[in-house]
Amino acid sequence: DGGITQSPKYLFRKEGQNVTLSCEQNLNHDAMYWYRQDPGQGLRLIYYSQIVNDFQKGDIAEGYSVSREKKESFPLTVTSAQKNPTAFYLCASTSEWGYTFGSGTRLTVV
Amino acid sequence: AQSVTQLGSHVSVSEGALVLLRCNYSSSVPPYLFWYVQYPNQGLQLLLKYTSAATLVKGINGFEAEFKKSETSFHLTKPSAHMSDAAEYFCAVSRNSGGYQKVTFGTGTKLQVIP
């Protein structure tokens, strides 16, 4: 079955550490997105990529970085510069029918 | 510019009762409108989508939504709530921006279904 796989499901980060969240899709979609979800705030766009080797900042890109070396993969790195990284992170890709979301990664700073 | 307002962060209904989740949007161009559902610790799943073909849109799990341009609304309804409908629901508006679909999500409405 086609879909988006995010890993890990739960991730714990120590202060000052960089961590990378994985997102892989086998839907052959060109566009991929990373969203951050906090309670009561809906989804906020971090980064998006419309094509391989190209990506754009979203509304809250500070403290995050991405790469898009392959069509199937769009990893997100949460750097130590992100002061409040505890959140639920969702990866998505789009077709004409709308977004397909992964099942998310819950990141907690310990 | 575009925005979405979901009225009511929490809605409670009895099992078997009508479900009504409200969404109002603003958009400078004719929009695409969506409703998504999210179960705990999962991603969002598309319920239905409005793309100007018909004002009444039927989705999965018995949900439907009506696009009312005069009211700038896209409310989600279901005639009879089931326990399995308990989840968080997000309304979203989308428009083409520089070749990609810019999507703005509402802040979500948590639906509680009371037995």
Image: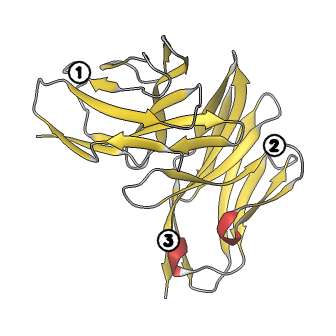
Rendering quarter of residue A87: top left
Q: Residue furthest top?
A: A53
Q: Is residue B61 above or below residue B89?
A: below
Dots 1 and 3: beta carbons under 8 Å? Answer: no
Report if residue A37 is visible in the image: no
In the image, is B88 to the left or to the right of B24? left
**Label 2 to label 1: alpha-carbon separation:** 38 Å
Residue A60 location (% of width, % of height): 42, 24
Q: Residue at x 68, y 31 (%)?
A: B2
* A30 shown above or below B17: above
Q: Which residue is mark 2?
A: B51
Is the residue under label 2 in contact with that under label 3 (CB below 8 Å)? no
Q: Which mark is residue B86?
A: 3
- In the picture, the quarter occupied by the C terminus of chain A is top left
| Label 3, residues with CA under 10 Å away: few <14, some 14-19, many ≥20 | many
Q: Secondary structure at mark 3?
A: loop
In which quarter of the view is residue A81 placed? top left
Q: Residues within 10 Å of mark 1 (few under 14, many from 20)?
A: some
Q: Please state which amino acid type lies under the numbered disc 2.
A: Thr
Per the image, the residue denoted by label 1 is: A79
Label 3, label 2: how many angstroms apart (C-alpha)? Answer: 27 Å
Q: Residues within 10 Å of mark 2 (few under 14, many from 20)?
A: some
x and y, in percent, of residue A9 in the image: 29, 47
